[in-house]
Image (tube, rainbow, N blue to C red):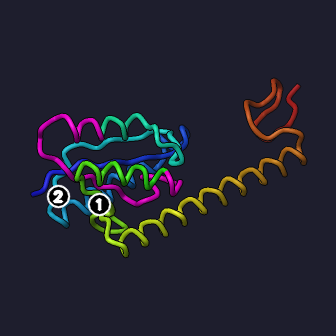
């Protein structure tokens, strides 16, 4: 059995209690069992955007890989967009893995995402560009929906004003 770490991430604080982290962990554990890996520890990024490079759990993961002398050199993720939703951030993280000789495995995209052969790099970057595009489109759709609601009702987010119930009806 090859010992490995797992890395999971959800971007919004509201998603921490949702299904995302559990789904990712289950996929990673299934992949590990089927492919001869033993997941020693799961590093969970709770409510941190995939568009930023500076993430506490990812930093702890990298430090643990470097300093503990345990011989673990493999990290399993569910999908490349859990690592990053920005192509440049993704490639910076992958470069860190490459520089230290770590293996990055995805349950969706397959083994050794950090490989530097031309075809693997092209495919990884295409997936990264698609993830970045998907994130951009999602943000645009959510912004448009909030703008429509704000225009229709005068407000969209935040706590209900005093005296209003959930149906936006004034309670006297």
Left or right, residue 4 beside residue 171? left
From which residue to which does the magenta span run? Answer: 62-88
User: Residue 105 shows which numbered tag?
Assistant: 1
Mark 2 crowd level (few <14, some 14–19, many ≥20, 10 Å Cα): some
Q: Is residue 137 above or below residue 151?
A: below
Where does the C terminus fall, quadrant-wise?
top right
* Residue at horizontal 26 percent and vertical 61 percent from the top: 30
| Contact, mark 1 vs mark 2 (Cβ under 8 Å) | yes
* Residue at horizontal 14 percent and vertical 62 percent from the top: 36
Q: Tell me if residue 63 is in the magenta stretch.
A: yes
Q: Nearer the viewer, residue 171 or 10?
A: 10
Q: Nearer the viewer, residue 125 or 148?
A: 125
Q: Is residue 21 above or below residue 33?
A: above
Q: Residue furthest bottom?
A: 119
User: Residue 21 shows which numbered tag?
Assistant: none
- Which x, y percent locates residue 2? 13, 56
User: Residue 37 shows which numbered tag?
Assistant: 2
Q: Nearer the viewer, residue 67 or 38?
A: 67
* Residue at horizontal 67 percent and vertical 60 percent from the top: 137
């Amino acid at each position: 059995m090859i010992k490995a770490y797992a890395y999971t991430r959800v971007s919004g604080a509201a998603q921490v209690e949702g299904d995302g982290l559990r789904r990712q962990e289950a996929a990673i554990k299934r992949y590990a069992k089927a492919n001869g890996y033993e997941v020693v520890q799961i590093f969970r990024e709770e409510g941190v955007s995939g568009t930023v490079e500076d993430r506490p759990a990812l930093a702890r993961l990298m430090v643990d890989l470097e300093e503990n002398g345990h011989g673990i050199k493999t990290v399993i993720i569910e999908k490349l967009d859990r690592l990053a939703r920005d192509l440049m951030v993704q490639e910076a993280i992958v470069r860190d893995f490459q520089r230290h000789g770590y293996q990055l495995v995805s349950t969706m995209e397959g083994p050794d995402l950090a490989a530097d052969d031309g075809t693997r790099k092209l495919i990884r970057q295409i997936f990264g560009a698609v993830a970045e595009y998907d994130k951009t489109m999602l943000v645009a759709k959510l912004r448009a929906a909030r703008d429509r609601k704000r225009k229709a009702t005068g407000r969209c987010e935040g706590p209900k004003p005093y005296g209003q119930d959930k149906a936006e009806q004034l309670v006297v």
